[in-house]
Amino acid sequence: MDKPVCFIDTDSAGKLRVQQSALKILEQIQQPVVVVAVVGLYRTGKSHLMNRLAGKQTGFALGSTTESKTKGIWMWCVSHPTKAGTTLVLLDTEGLGDVDKGDPKHDTNIFSLAVLLSSTLVYNSRGTIDNKAVMDLQYVTELSECIKVKSSDEDADDSSEFVKFFPSFIWALRDFTLELKIDGKDVPEDEYLEFALKLKPGTSRSVIEYNFPRECIQKFFPSRKCFTFPFPTAPENMSRLGSLASADISSEFLKVTDHFCKFVFHDSCVKRLKVGHTVTGRVLGHLAKTYVDTISSGAVPCLENAVIAMATIENKAAVKEGLQVYQSEMEKLKDSFPLELKDVFSEHQHLSSTATQAFMKRSFKDTDGKYLKSLEEKIIKLFDEHLCQNEHASKKRCEEILSSLSAPMMVKLKKGFYAKPGGYDLFCKDLEDIVNKYNSQAKKEVKAEEILEEFLKQKSVDSKAILQADKKLTEKEKKIKEEKEKAALLEQEIKAREEKLRQLEEKMEAERQSNEEMMRQMKEKMDEEMRLQREETERAMNRKLREQADLLQKSFKEEADVMRQEMEEFKRQNTESNRAGELFSSLHPVPF
């Protein structure tokens, strides 16, 4: 994409909707996506940061008035600068807190969508992280009411699960002019953020109100980062920020921006669903449509329902994709019909495995194997159809061979060549030559034995007539030869049945092996999904453990500081006491 497009906006009734043109763009992106969304109050410079992430000076609209320039959510898809085979999706959201909005829930919905769709969430604000700045991020306190993890009502508050799929969090502080100091000591940006999110002790109403948004940020976004940006340029140039040359922009601002971009590129993860499934552009589009439609209906977006809906869409498409792989290659094979059965079976097994791979690549959460079973059934149906077509081609070829080989015999029959003494033996000799040549030419044909059986049955009518008319043979000899001919016909019939049974067994074996290969790939897929879920849970646990360790470390540090202060006080008191004792001793010497 050479420029951003509108992704989500509102219709004439004020309801959110997803733009079809944006969905078409995402539909073409089969790669995994890293989704970075920026949120924040309007007129805080969000769009400029996103343009820099896109590697451009301009792109997302930059406003220069007090009116919010970006409406809804805009999207820009670019190749990821450091992760090969990955697309970077940038989402620039409508500024929060715009007084012109009619729906008070609109900002909350935009914020919730940014959280749901992104793998990294950038919160952009101006100035310092004081209590007002934290309170302006009130939307985070409403997430537990605006997003559900599970569809059941068994656990009304499932917000503890958010950490498993919520994005990492970056607080971008714009126009920051203060020194990064706490208690007179220089501190890094992240420590400044954590200090701003520090909870107050106590249980009063004011303390609870103060702590609540901070608790939510800590709970929902355990992976946090902070960047402080100085003023980019002189105030009179701010309206032209998008067109300014680098020389006109603060070198310190450019330095921080470069650091910010590198961090986002390196640390932002590929977007994953709750079950650990990698999100592609196509899946992101489906997710956005599901969430927006749910919000527009007045319901609360549910991660579990979204995954189920996504699994249904993707699994149906996976069946279609896998079947297309099988069918397109089998169609090419038709040009070579008739083929030996072993060649058809071999190609079937290969294509069935390839089709299953295509299915597995796209499918997810097919825990009961319903969609894989559907693919298998459709493949078997196509396989049977191609077997029939191969048999039809084989039958045609066998008939052509017999027609060609028996043509001289047919001429002799018409001329009455065999209607003479000894004619039966001549007929049998010619028939034997035909069968031998046929077996040599058609021995690899699927329908060879069956077509030969039909041919011999047809010729038995001529054989009987010639036998009865042959005056060279006695009645006893005729009887013996008739029985011999019946035995030969029966033998060929048995051979044809045995061949059909053998082919059926080979077909069943080919299907069994294909099924085993499907099950093997299914097991690998389920093992992989389980591994991703374990990793997802472990990441959530590690985040919580790090958060807990940080809290403990801070707590211990505070306790150590208190103890150190107490010890200093003890030392001071002890020194003063000693001095007082010395003074007392000097004033009141002990008599000997």
Image (spheres, rainbow, N blue to C red):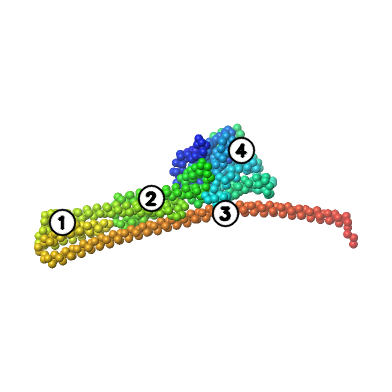
Q: Is residue 362 visible?
A: no
Could you say where residue 269 lies in the image, as x and y percent from the top left? 52, 48
Q: Is tag 3's residue or tag 4's residue first in the polypeptide sequence?
A: 4
Q: Which residue is drawn at 41% across and 50% down?
A: 319
Which numbered disc, 2 or 4, marks the residue that appears first in the sequence? Answer: 4
Q: In which quarter of the image is residue 105?
A: top right
Q: Which mark is residue 323?
A: 2
Residue 169, relative to residue 417: is it above or below? Answer: above
Q: Give the residue pinned by disc 1.
A: 409
As measured in the structure, the alpha-carbon distance from the residue carrying label 3 to the one carrying label 4 is: 38 Å
Which residue does the numbered mark 4 point to in the structure image?
Answer: 231
Q: Do the CB atoms of the residues marked 1 and 3 lie less than 8 Å apart?
A: no
Residue 485, which numbered label? none
Cα distance in 3D space between marks 1 and 4: 103 Å
Q: Which residue sits at x=51%, y=46%?
A: 34
Q: Are the residues flagged by discs 2 and 4 in contact, CB closer than 8 Å?
A: no
What amino acid is at disc 4?
A: Phe
Three-letter residue code for mark 3: Met
In the rendered image, the vertical position of residue 246 relative to residue 533, given as above or below: above
Helix, strand or loop status at disc 3: helix
Q: What element carries label 4?
A: loop
Say which of 61 and 211 sits in front: 211
Q: How crowded is mark 3: few (under 14 residues within 10 Å), some or many (20 or more)?
A: some
Q: Position of residue 482 (x, y in %)?
A: 16, 64
As measured in the structure, the alpha-carbon distance from the residue carrying label 2 to the one carrying label 4 is: 57 Å
Amino acid under disc 2: Leu
Q: Which mark is residue 541?
A: 3
Mark sitting earlier along the chain (1/4): 4
Instruction: Point out residue 397 in the picture as x, y percentages from the top left corner.
Output: 24, 53
